[in-house]
Image (cartoon, grey):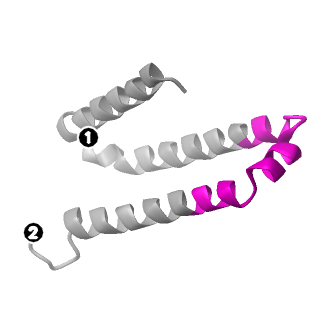
């Protein structure tokens, strides 16, 4: 993905945040969660099909080796840590004042 594509993703994300904060009805949140789950599942499925359909997939994985595995592991762990930090900072527990 090129720089323009990454920038476009960030712009759409920011537009979505803005719309969610201002116009999105709270009663639709349940449906939005379902739509997000379906969308992410479909995206992951199509990525898997693309990877699995590559004739050089197994060789590419062998070539990536431990370095590729370590990169993926650090990415996942970093995401988990960031979500934990953001949840602790921005989401309040029941009975807790913010």
Residue 24 visible in the shown view: no
Among the 4 quarters of the image, the one containing residue 22 = top left
Image quadrant holding the C terminus, namely: bottom left
Residue 92 picture location, percent across and down: 20, 70
Q: Is residue 69 above or below residue 19?
A: below
**Rendered-image quadrant of the N terminus:** top right
User: Which residue is most to the bottom?
Assistant: 95
Q: What element does badge 2 sit on? A: loop
Residue 89 occupies quadrant: bottom left
- Which one is nearer the viewer's eye here, 88 or 75? 75
Which residue in the structure is indicated by mark 2?
A: 98
- Bounds of the magenta span? 48-73
* Residue 58 pos. (x, y %): 87, 47
What secondary structure predominates along the stretch shown in magenta? Answer: helix
Image location (x, y in percent) of residue 85 = 30, 67
Q: Which residue is mark 1?
A: 25
Residue 31 sits in which quadrant?
A: top left
Report if residue 52 lies within the magenta region: yes
Crowdedness near tag 1: few (<14), some (14–19) or many (≥20) residues, C-alpha within 10 Å: few
């Amino acid at each position: 993905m090129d720089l323009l594509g990454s920038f476009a993703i960030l712009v759409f994300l920011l537009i979505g945040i803005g719309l969610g904060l201002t116009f999105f009805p709270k009663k639709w949140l349940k449906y939005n969660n379902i739509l997000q789950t379906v969308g992410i599942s479909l995206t992951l499925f199509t990525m898997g099909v693309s990877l699995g359909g590559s004739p050089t997939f197994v060789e590419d994985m062998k070539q990536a080796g431990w370095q590729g595995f370590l990169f993926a592991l650090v990415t996942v762990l970093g995401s988990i840590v960031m979500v934990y930090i953001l949840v602790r900072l921005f989401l309040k527990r029941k009975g807790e004042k913010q």
